[in-house]
Image (tube, rainbow, N blue to C red):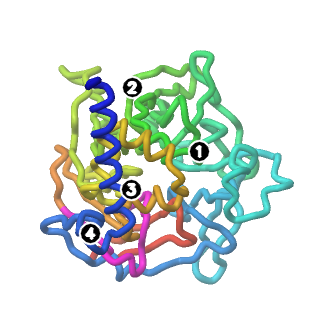
Amino acid sequence: MNSKFVFTAAKLAALAVFIAIYQNPSRVNFHAPPVIPGSRDDLHAAQLVKVTAAVGPESLAFDPSGGGPYAGVADGRILRWQGHGLGWSEFAVTTSQRKECVRALALEMEHVCGRPLGLRFHKKSGELYIADAYLGLQVVGPNGGLATPLVSQVEGHPLRFTNDLDIDEDKDVIYFTDTSTSFQRRQFMSSILSGDKTGKLLKYNISSKEVTVLVQGLAFANGVALSKDRSFVLVAETSTCRVLRLWLDGPNAGNVDVFAELPGFPDNIRRNPKGEFWVALHAKKGILSNWAVSKSWAGKTLLKLPFSFKQLHSLLVGGKAHATAIRLSEEGKILEVLEDCEGKSLKFISEVEEKDGKLWIGSVLMPFIGIYNLH
């Protein structure tokens, strides 16, 4: 018998079992998100702040005077929180072509309206730098308004999925990610399930406007964070559930190693005042999702089947919306895990920013941010 035929038949049989489990998750426990030893199921106590007429405050940033947070939402605007009395106000946009940008969530319009993801303030200049998934790296002044494009292509190729950034204010350098050269943001499930490894970590020099590719071949390049001493920069590799470290200074300068292996799919990384790192997990990695993303043939086959986006996403997140935040040491060791295991308050979190004894928590899919008291 033809060996290729046998191999294909075996794959299809395995996929049939997989689909049967997916369609009847109550019969097995494979579909449920795994338990993380030592985690605290406390995030359900977070206070929720609704983002009025908007969805998906993915990244949060505070200006140099402590104002905010500021958040980019799905209709392309960047909003500013002015407290419970005044609520949210529009601060900036990444394109002037906003005539049709009237719905809170319209995936088919993201390339027109823009989709601001990672946000960071330059503490010295007061400018807000923006990673817009479709429009590239941009900047807007302290008074907001229409942002100015900085980088929309690299080495003659357009940025297809600009994701996150961090700033070295002393060197006037920005480190940022382009998640994929093949898929755009609204195709993120295809990027993950296809085994795409075309992501990049890049550097932008504010003075010279020069862009340098630092690392390429990344599997869904996502969150970015500099170490406190600026000796290394971290980048989340979502599809492989790990955080990589690029050494910038010292004897290991230029080398890349694995900083942390995580129990789920990391989104943004943010350094806290102590120099530790908070990593937001979009979801924990279960047995089925691990199988789907680790076997490229399985993921590619799933993409060809008549599953909707919601069904594929449910597969990835284990069927239950939940929230997981992980605090890492400066050496990459897990120090603390906070969860809302049942998704009572928080779910699909994308960023955790620690400020003044509180965690400010964003979500790329939900219509609110969370505020969790650490003490």
Question: Per the image, is 241 magenta?
Answer: no
Residue matched to label 2 = 217
Q: Is residue 272 left or right of residue 133?
A: left
Three-letter residue code for mark 1: Ile
Percent position (x, y) of residue 223? 41, 45
Q: Which mark is residue 130?
A: 1
Furthest residue to the front?
A: 1
Furthest residue to the left?
A: 37
Image: 104 above or below 344 = above
Distance from disc 4 to disc 3, alpha carbons, whole Å, reads 20 Å
Residue matched to label 3 = 316
Question: Per the image, is 348 magenta?
Answer: yes
* Earlier sequence position, callout 3 versus callout 2: 2
Identify which residue is drawn at 28% across, 32% down.
Answer: 7
Near-viewer residue (84 or 257): 257
Q: Is residue 143 visible?
A: no
